[in-house]
Image: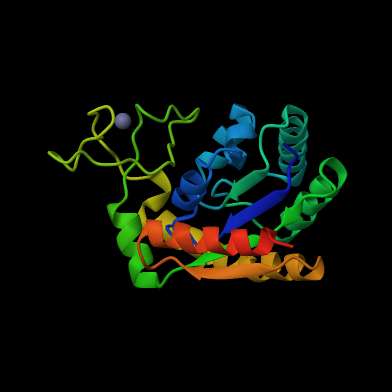
Amino acid sequence: MTLALAVPVFGPPAAGKTTLAASLGQTPGSAVFRLREHVPETILAATATSAERLGWIDDFTVVTALRSYVDATVQADEAHTVFFDNFPGNGAQVRLFLAALRQHAPDCMVSAVELTVDVTTLYRRAFQRRVCHRCERDPIHDPRLPAVPSADDAQRCARCGGILHPRRGDAPRLLRARLNRYRQTADGIREAFAAAGVVVTPFDSGASADQTADAVTALLVRSSQP
Ligand SMILES: [Zn+2]
């Protein structure tokens, strides 16, 4: 199974990137890349405490993590499609990303997805969404994956029964800073993809997560047909 399609998923906070990547990544032959899972704990910890850095990770760490992931995925030969959750994060990372693919998987197609959502929905989602510290053992206790609340008690995790918590980065001050940063970097991401001839397709994620996943799947099927 040769790596044939790379799908970077980017967009503002709470647009549904992680939900989309996790949902599509469950398809057999698919995988999900999340940068923070491939970055040394000490570097993650250094980025977590300051609102200015907001999880910013230096280019050297990014390119090292990315190259070793792509190389290992190609060697393992188990995935034909990889979804890149919230990556690349800026124009420079787009160029690093495309260079890594050219080197390790030269025949891999790239189809980028930009999720969009109106600001009201974005704030409502960020306010409502919860994570589970028990189900997601994050190295710096900053879980990110959306947890499903129990049907009996919306404060508890449907999977383990533990108490759910807001995401650390969804605190109002951090959310505003993350949204501003996205607005500052999004043009650079789009321009770097455009310069490399990669199509970026915007999707409004204001509808349900399933509808968004279906729409993106339809696009990927269309774009993988000759
Ligand atoms: Zn749980």
The answer to whether residue 106 is above or below residue 214 is above
* Quarter of the figure with the N terminus: top right
* Residue 14 % position (x, y): 42, 57
| Spot occupied by residue 62 in the image (x, y as percentages of width and height) | 71, 42
User: Looking at the rendering, which quadrant does residue 81 occupy?
Assistant: top right
Q: Give the position of the C terminus as an image quadrant.
A: bottom right
The residue at 33%/40% (across/down) is 147
148 displayed left or right of 78: left
Q: Is residue 160 visible?
A: yes
Of residue 157 and residue 55, the one placed in the foreground of this image is 157
Q: Residue furthest left?
A: 152
**Measuring 79% from the left and 53% from the top, which residue is drawn there?**
98
Left or right position of 16 against 159: right
Total numbered labels:
0
Q: Is residue 31 above or below residue 136?
A: below
- Residue at 44% in and 49% down: 19
Could you tell whether 72 is left or right of 42 in the image?
right
- Residue at the outermost front position: 226
In the rendered image of this protein, does residue 199 appear above or below residue 21?
below
Spot occupied by residue 58 in the image (x, y as percentages of width and height):
71, 44
Q: Nearer the viewer, residue 188 or 168?
A: 188
Q: Residue at x 65, y 61 (%)?
A: 112
Q: Position of residue 144 (x, y in %)?
A: 44, 41
**Figure check: 36 above or below 90:** above
- The answer to whether residue 88 shows anywhere in this view is no
Which one is nearer the viewer's eye here, 147 or 176?
A: 147
Display coloring: rainbow
Ligand 1 lies in which image quarter? Answer: top left
